[in-house]
Image: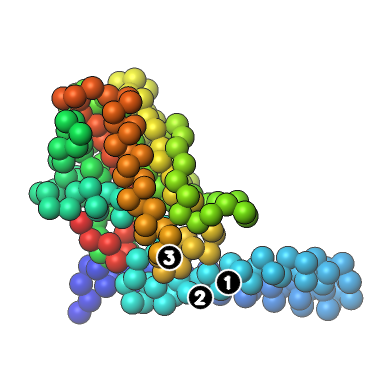
Amino acid sequence: AADEIQINNLENTLEAALALNYIYKVVRHYYILGKRTLSLYIIMQLQMILPLVMREAEAYASALKAFAYGQPIGDGAGALVAAKLMHGYEKRKISKDCVAATVPLEGRTAYVIKAEGPGGNVGKPGDAIKTIIEENSGKIASIIVVDAALKLEGEKPGAVAEGIGVAIGGPGVEKFKVEESLLKYRIPINAVIIKEDVGDAVSPMRKEIFEAADKAIQRIKRLIHEKTREGDSVIIAGIGNTIGIGQ
């Protein structure tokens, strides 16, 4: 019988296989439609976007290998930052598939959150952040969210940038949960992002992205110094798929 880590990895492998199958079906649809209608324009459109389609398909093909072998992927950059910060400290389950650790950092108390690894898992970071805010009766000086983000062509993979807001991708449910608590207690929030290509997000983690985790930690420490005072409590949330990354 498979354990929970293997089940999560198998789920991720299936998702990547489904994505590849969907790309194949869409390309086949337009190819057959173009032939059946004898429309040059449908075939031309397909040919024009094919390099982008192939790029995405190749990314999902390499994702299959990463998920099957339980290797860390580019999307796990935020989870890696959190794992480095909480390493050696006691962890506790804080919400569905999420763990938290209380870490002394630069004279502050940091509540570090990430998805529970090393299985393929993104957890419920919105619920985790909300729970810690409520546990502290809203007495949180700052929240810092760390996540991977898509870079533009010409930008270097592993570049670190700062922003304001809840840097959580997806349908927006987790983002809303955090924003609800922020508004209630008027807590400032900052984001630290690690830039990567669309192919890097689901492929085995590149050296540049792995090394960017230490740069992101330096940015977090600087933000803590600038935005909070000694003795304050802060939340640091590492967002992303934690496959291959423990805690």
* Image location (x, y in percent) of residue 136: 17, 27
* Image location (x, y in percent) of residue 60: 51, 70
Which numbered dot is residue 61? Answer: 2
The image shows a total of numbered marks equal to 3
Q: Estimate how packed mark 1 is, as few (under 14), some (14 to 19) or many (20 or more) residues with alpha carbons within 10 Å.
A: many
Callout in the foreground (2, 3): 3
Please identify the quadrant where the C terminus is shown: bottom left
Please identify the quadrant where the N terminus is shown: bottom left
Tag 3: amino acid: Arg
Tags 1 and 2 touching, CB below 8 Å: yes
17 lies above or below 205: below
Q: Secondary structure at mark 3?
A: loop
Q: Earlier in the sequence, mark 1 or mark 3?
A: 1
Tell me what residue is drawn at x 45 percent, y 68 percent. 203
* Image location (x, y in percent) of residue 119: 28, 65
Callout in the foreground (1, 3): 3
96 lies above or below 127: below
Residue 68 in view (yes/no): yes
Q: Secondary structure at mark 1?
A: helix
Residue 130 in view (yes/no): no
Q: Estimate how packed mark 3 is, as few (under 14), some (14 to 19) or many (20 or more) residues with alpha carbons within 10 Å.
A: some
Which residue is disc 1 drawn over?
Answer: 57
Tag 1: amino acid: Ala
Tags 1 and 3 touching, CB below 8 Å: no
Q: Nearer the viewer, residue 86 or 46?
A: 86
Tell me what residue is drawn at x 12 percent, y 49 percent. 89
Tell me which corner region of the image, top left, top right, bottom left or bottom right, holds residue 183: top left
Alpha carbon of mark 2 to alpha carbon of mark 3: how far?
16 Å
For this view, does 208 lie left or right of residue 112? Answer: right
